Image (spheres, rainbow, N blue to C red):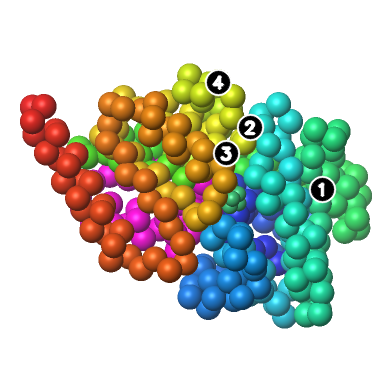
Amino acid sequence: MKIGIPRALLYYRYGIFWETFFQKLGHETVLSPRTNKDILTKGEQLSIDENCLSTKLFFGHVAALEGKCDYCFVPRIANLGDAGRFCSRFEALPDMCSNMFRDTGLKILRANIDPEQNIPAKRAYLKLAMQLGASREQAQAAYEAGMAAQMEDFRKKIKLNRALLKKEGIKVLVVSHPYNLYDEYIGAPIIKSIRNLDAVPICSDGVDPREARSKSTEIARYVPWVVSRELLGAIQMYRNQIDGIVLITAFPCGPDSMVNEMIIRRISHVPILNLLLDSQDGNAGIDTRLESFIDIIRFRKEVEQ
Ligand code: SF4
């Protein structure tokens, strides 16, 4: 069976697990292409205006899988138990996709992960594997292989950040949800621009997620969202090793509008640039703001020396 995976939202957190899991079960996985103008346009056409840019892109990625797979995998991932909740939009994705694509022939493959309702991830994935015809042993082996691949990926990202922090030059912590950080339309051009300005971008997801969630309480005692906790934790863990922070938000993100405000109020020892992106933005304005931002950091460093 061919299982399509949209290259958007939680793909950038769990994608390696999903690909390994399905492949280990003997299925072929098909990824949607990297974001391009057609994917964005299609996502905007399918979505209501009120959705955030990241969710619009997700729908565009689902559409890009039409005719390319037997099922498109759209799990409902509600929370990580005590570690916090995911954005409520993730809870609605399978229903929204089933409705949106009901006349297209695209079939949605669901999984329901909700530890708060006593459905931990492992149970949900084992159930899904068995629905796809696997034995319990095969399901267990696929789950373990997926987890091992995922852990290895987390370790690689942490190692990369450690190496980047040892480099010479201006270090900028780029803080955003991983699906924004690595998306070709949202974060990737910003990371490239920072490099082109001779600065070193450090991505906020290169941290141990558990440790980051724990560290986040040193900035804000309670934030409901898992990823927001990890972003705050990354800032807390790296705050003395960086020269500036770039916040990237996909308009109109509810969690980021609250958390970014908190970051700006509570982190005062380094300059912060807050970039709010919507589908209208070209790169020219952003490049100019980044250039001024790096100039300010450079100037501060010169004065301090
Ligand atoms: S956290 Fe923000 S960017 Fe992410 S899906 Fe929710 S509203 Fe969109």
Check if mark 1's residue and mark 4's residue have beta carbons within 8 Å: no
Q: Is mark 3 within 8 Å of ligand 1?
A: yes
Magenta stretch?
A: 177-203
At numbered mark 1, what does the secondary structure look like: helix, strand or loop? strand
> For mark 2, what is the residue?
224
Q: Is mark 2 within 8 Å of ligand 1?
A: no
Question: Which sits in the foreground, 239 or 293?
Answer: 293
Quadrant including the C terminus: top left
Answer with the quarter of the image where residue 281 lies.
bottom left
At numbered mark 2, what does the secondary structure look like: helix, strand or loop? loop
Q: Is label 4 or label 3 in front?
A: 4
* First-in-chain label (4 vs 3): 4
Q: Is residue 239 left or right of residue 87?
A: left
Is residue 238 depicted above or below 134 in this figure?
above
> For mark 1, what is the residue?
112
Question: Which sits in the foreground, 56 or 239?
Answer: 56
Answer with the quarter of the image where residue 131 lies.
bottom right
Circle 4 crowding by C-alpha within 10 Å: few under 14, some 14–19, many from 20: few
Report how far apart the C-alphas of labels 4 and 2 lie in the structure.
10 Å
Label ID, residue 227: 3
Label ID, residue 221: 4
Q: Is residue 205 left or right of residue 13?
A: left
